[in-house]
Amino acid sequence: MTYYDRVELPPEDEFWDEDREIERKYPRQDAPGIFEVHFDTDLATHTNEWRFPKVPLRRANGADLDLFGTSRREPTTPKPIWTAMPAVLPSKMKVKQHVDGRAHSGGLGDETRKLYNAMSYKVLRDGWGFNAFITVTAKYLGLFSHAEFAEMIPEMNKAIAGWLQARPKRSARYFLTEPADHSYIFVLERSGYRHGLHFHMMCSIPVALRKEFHAYLRDWWENRACLAVPTNAVDVRYSDSGSRSKHYTNQAIKFRYLIKTVQQHAYAFDRDGERCWAVDFMMPWWPRFGRPDTLPIRTRQIYGISRDLNMKARREWGQKVGWNFVSKIDQRRLSEIYSGSEIPAWQARFVGEPGWWKQY
């Protein structure tokens, strides 16, 4: 009923009958939008009696939608994190909560044996070892969170595996293409005060893709760090050798540098039952200043092995070739771990010689 309709009101009886008819058809509680307001009273007294029924709608992102379409967000309590992160400099990337940020020992213990088993199995399976040695330093990338830097390493390996699968290599003899697998071992460490947190990784990169791979790896870290990568942030070095024996020797030298943070009290027993210290039979390669300072690492992930070199892959490979792989350390042949007997054993298996594993 508009204002002009109220100026020329009909008789009181007619208006009363009409008003009762409207209230009967459209009661206030059930019909929002039709209200009877007397202008001779205060408007606030009527607005308190208005009731707007809620429409049952689905919750959208924690908010309730009322009749007029406006959103009302309910107060939420912040969820507790898994563990408190240490007091470190702010980083650019968001760290997932399941990554452990507590301080742990930076030295290698039983991890040294697992890394050697993976390297020895790689040579026995393929006849060649790792030909690339990668070093990535977190400080030069602007990253100061240990857990954040450790979480980027699996992402990097996944990206490298996809990059190699998209670029098959060609055999010069048969002109066939086959995918290049990404086999690797790495160690995350923080030794000394010069470079800080960094990791070393040994992997295999085809010769034809070396220059392209270095550029790809630098671009990948630039995208993750959101800044230009300096030359000393991502370092890739290759091992070029003509014979398999020389290639194995170069690989052994880089592996000894990879395990330079082996703990002093790590040991193993030889065949005579005597205790041998790992720093003696593993022969870690130390700089000229002596043993590096081993500082704690704020993450549990201090080493890594690709899936095609882990224990499950070795067991499946043993079922195919008819011999379960047992490394020299597990056989307690500690004085022969760098002898390079994997190469003649691979050659004997390649030509189908019976009992080829005896040469290992």
Image (cartoon, rainbow, N blue to C red):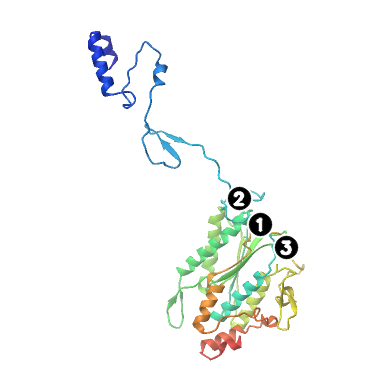
The residue that appears at 49% across and 69% down in the rendered structure is 164
How many numbered dots are placed on residues in this image?
A: 3
Circles 1, 3 touching at the beta carbon (< 8 Å): no
Secondary structure type for disc 2: loop
Question: From the image, which quarter does the C terminus lie in?
Answer: bottom right
Question: From the image, which quarter does the N terminus lie in?
Answer: top left
Q: Position of residue 294 (x, y in %)?
A: 72, 63
Asked whether, in this view, residue 86 is left or right of residue 159, the answer is: right
User: To which quarter of the image does residue 157 belong?
Assistant: bottom right
Secondary structure type for disc 3: loop
Asked whether, in this view, residue 35 is left or right of residue 94, the answer is: left
Q: Nearer the viewer, mark 2 or mark 3?
A: 3
Asked whether, in this view, residue 264 is left or right of residue 137, the answer is: right
Asked whether, in this view, residue 188 is left or right of residue 12, the answer is: right
Regarding residue 243, the answer to whether it shows in the image is: no
Q: Position of residue 80 (x, y in %)?
A: 58, 46
Q: Position of residue 242 (x, y in %)?
A: 58, 82
| Location of mark 3 (residue) | 294
Considering only order in the chain, which callout, 3 or 2, is on the residue closer to the N terminus?
2
| Location of mark 2 (residue) | 91
Cα distance in 3D space between marks 2 and 1 = 15 Å
Q: In the rendered image of this protein, does residue 21 appear above or below residue 237?
A: above
Considering only order in the chain, which callout, 1 or 2, is on the residue closer to the N terminus?
2
The residue that appears at 68% across and 69% down in the rendered structure is 109
| Location of mark 1 (residue) | 298
- What's the amino acid at mark 2? Ser
